[in-house]
């Protein structure tokens, strides 16, 4: 339907746009966005996107439907979204209530309600377009606005810089469009490039850090069939050392660097890993396999000590689910006992229970994982975190990298609080204390079921991280790494 037309409901269509989505050289899906003014002068923006990719051969489909309602003058009213990327869908409603957003999030049977501070203001998409047009796209101009981000479920600052006009070929013609750079504070300043016309319509949008592009196209082109490409293999980081028994690596020294930015801002320092010094490329990071000393851990349930955030149930970590609680008690055998021993037992139980170890599920809730017994590292980590919480052991989920078959791949595991500190276990690999080929980038309590913190830990480095093994220890013996070699 053309802009300026009238829908069957009598609303005026301001725009009706189809986009093709690509990731690197792969076509991964499409998006459809409409903007219309209703009879009650409400502006409604609706966006539906479909993404179909493979993860190590397993097909993953992600469906997203979003709807923003605002007044013609730009006052936000309500946002709604539904996302399906597992057997359960995630539904979010964020309604403006004075200076806050009343946010309701539901995943399957679980839901949570909380308030998000609007702060300095909030703009929905139609108001953002009007802001750009009002500013006039003058090269060198800078301004900002605040928008709601679904990934973080929060209001974040967007800093705009207009770079000027640029001629690009879209839909078979060379067009002069306004090029804008939008830096997203919630993502640590990650930049999104936009090409808009005089009316503010986006013709092309690109996230350079991810290689993700959406470009205006025809409905027929957007909906054409394409073979789903694999998005995991392109993110692998090659290793200069081939570890024959990586799970036995006790300690390792790595040089880490980023093509853009400072890797020191992305790496977590804790009892397992620390930055020893800076190099011309980045940093030297020492990583060790660390388990609690005998007699230092405390019995569970663990209460107090500021651990409430790491014990709460939410729509992702459904620790209050009767099924999750029963599974945890079955794993530990009884209530009470040593928290570290119980955590290892839960990790081993999760490893055995998830029989369908594949990449076809994308961040399912603990309740769903327990029902389907399927998933990859994120499902293992989430189920273990929920189960430990259900018996009173604080937990959090970690995102980072792990060595396997000549590469470092992005991975998730679990950390538990045992009274003397946080200790890491990997239920995807059996549940024991993790080895020194696990490199931690970020950790999150997943408070409120929000996964943005974990996503940012990966997004901030993916496709630009370099790793070189300097030395490593196996069986108490230390080896210096050559340029490429096999390790014990």
Image (cartoon, helix red, strand yellow):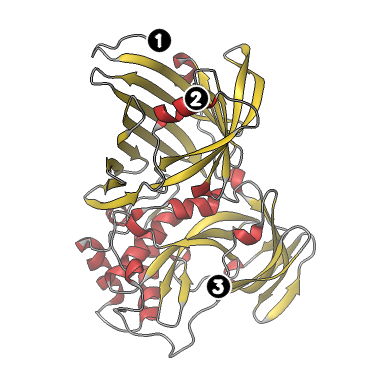
- Badge 3 marks a residue whose secondary structure is loop
Coordinates of residue 373 in the picture (x, y in percent): 33, 55
Q: Nearer the viewer, residue 340 or 320?
A: 320
Note whether residue 40 is visible.
yes
- Tell me, yes or no, whether the two marked residues, 1 and 2, touch with CB atoms within 8 Å: no
Q: Which of disc 2 and disc 1 is earlier in sequence?
A: 1
Q: CA distance from mark 1 to mark 3?
A: 56 Å
Q: Which residue is mark 1?
A: 2
- Nearest to viewer (mark 1 / mark 3): 1
Note whether residue 225 is visible.
no
Coordinates of residue 257 in the picture (x, y in percent): 70, 56
Q: Nearer the viewer, residue 58 or 269?
A: 269
Q: Which residue is mark 2?
A: 134
Give the side of residue 87 with respect to residue 273, left or right.
left
Q: Which residue is mark 3?
A: 270
Q: Quadrant of residue 179?
A: top right
Q: Which of disc 3 and disc 1 is earlier in sequence?
A: 1
Q: CA distance from mark 1 to mark 2?
A: 23 Å
Q: In this picture, is 39 found above or below 472?
A: above
Q: Which of disc 2 and disc 3 is earlier in sequence?
A: 2
Q: What is the crowding at mark 2: few (fewer than 14 residues within 10 Å), some, or many (at least 20)?
A: few
């Amino acid at each position: 339907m053309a802009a300026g037309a009238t829908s069957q409901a009598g609303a005026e269509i301001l725009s009706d746009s189809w986009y093709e989505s690509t990731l690197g050289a792969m076509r991964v899906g499409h998006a459809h966005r409409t903007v219309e003014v209703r009879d009650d002068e409400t502006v409604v923006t609706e966006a539906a996107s479909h993404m179909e990719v493979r993860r190590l051969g397993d097909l993953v489909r992600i469906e997203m439907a979003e709807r923003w309602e605002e007044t013609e003058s730009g006052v936000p009213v309500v946002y709604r979204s539904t996302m399906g990327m597992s057997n359960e869908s995630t539904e979010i409603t964020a309604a403006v209530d004075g200076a806050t957003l009343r946010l309701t999030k539901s995943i399957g049977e679980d839901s949570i309600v909380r308030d998000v501070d609007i702060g300095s203001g909030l703009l929905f998409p139609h108001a953002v377009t009007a802001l750009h047009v009002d500013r006039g796209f003058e090269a060198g101009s800078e301004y900002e606005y605040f928008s709601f981000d679904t990934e973080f479920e929060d209001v974040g600052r967007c800093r705009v810089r207009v770079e000027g006009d640029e001629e690009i070929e879209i839909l078979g013609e060379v067009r002069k469009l306004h090029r804008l750079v939008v830096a997203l504070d919630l993502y640590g300043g990650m930049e999104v490039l936009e090409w808009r016309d005089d009316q503010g319509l986006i013709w092309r949008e690109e996230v350079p850090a991810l290689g993700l592009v959406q470009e205006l196209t025809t409905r027929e082109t957007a909906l054409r069939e394409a073979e789903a490409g694999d998005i995991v293999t392109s993110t692998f980081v090659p290793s200069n050392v081939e570890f024959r028994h990586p799970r036995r690596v006790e300690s390792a020294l790595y040089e880490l660097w980023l093509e853009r930015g400072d890797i020191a801002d992305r790496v977590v320092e804790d009892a397992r890993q620390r930055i020893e010094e800076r190099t011309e490329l980045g940093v030297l990071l020492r990583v060790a396999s660390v388990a609690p000393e005998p007699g230092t851990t405390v019995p569970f349930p663990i209460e107090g000590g500021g651990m409430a955030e790491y014990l709460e149930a939410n729509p992702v970590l459904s620790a209050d689910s009767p099924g999750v609680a029963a599974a945890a008690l079955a794993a530990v055998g009884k209530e009470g006992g040593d928290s570290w021993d119980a955590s290892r037992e839960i990790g081993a139980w999760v490893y055995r229970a998830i029989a369908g170890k594949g990449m076809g599920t994308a961040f399912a809730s603990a309740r769903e994982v327990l029902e389907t017994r399927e998933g990859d590292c994120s499902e293992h980590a989430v189920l273990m975190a929920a189960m430990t919480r259900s018996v009173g052991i604080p937990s959090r989920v970690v995102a980072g990298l792990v060595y396997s078959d000549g590469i470092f791949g992005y991975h998730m595991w679990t950390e538990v609080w045992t009274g003397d500190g946080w200790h890491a276990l990997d239920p995807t690999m059996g549940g024991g204390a993790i080895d020194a080929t696990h490199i931690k980038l970020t950790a999150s309590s997943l408070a409120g079921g929000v996964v943005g913190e974990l996503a940012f830990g990966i997004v901030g480095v993916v496709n630009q991280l370099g790793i070189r093994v300097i030395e490593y220890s196996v069986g108490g013996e230390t080896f210096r790494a050559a340029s490429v070699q096999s390790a014990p």
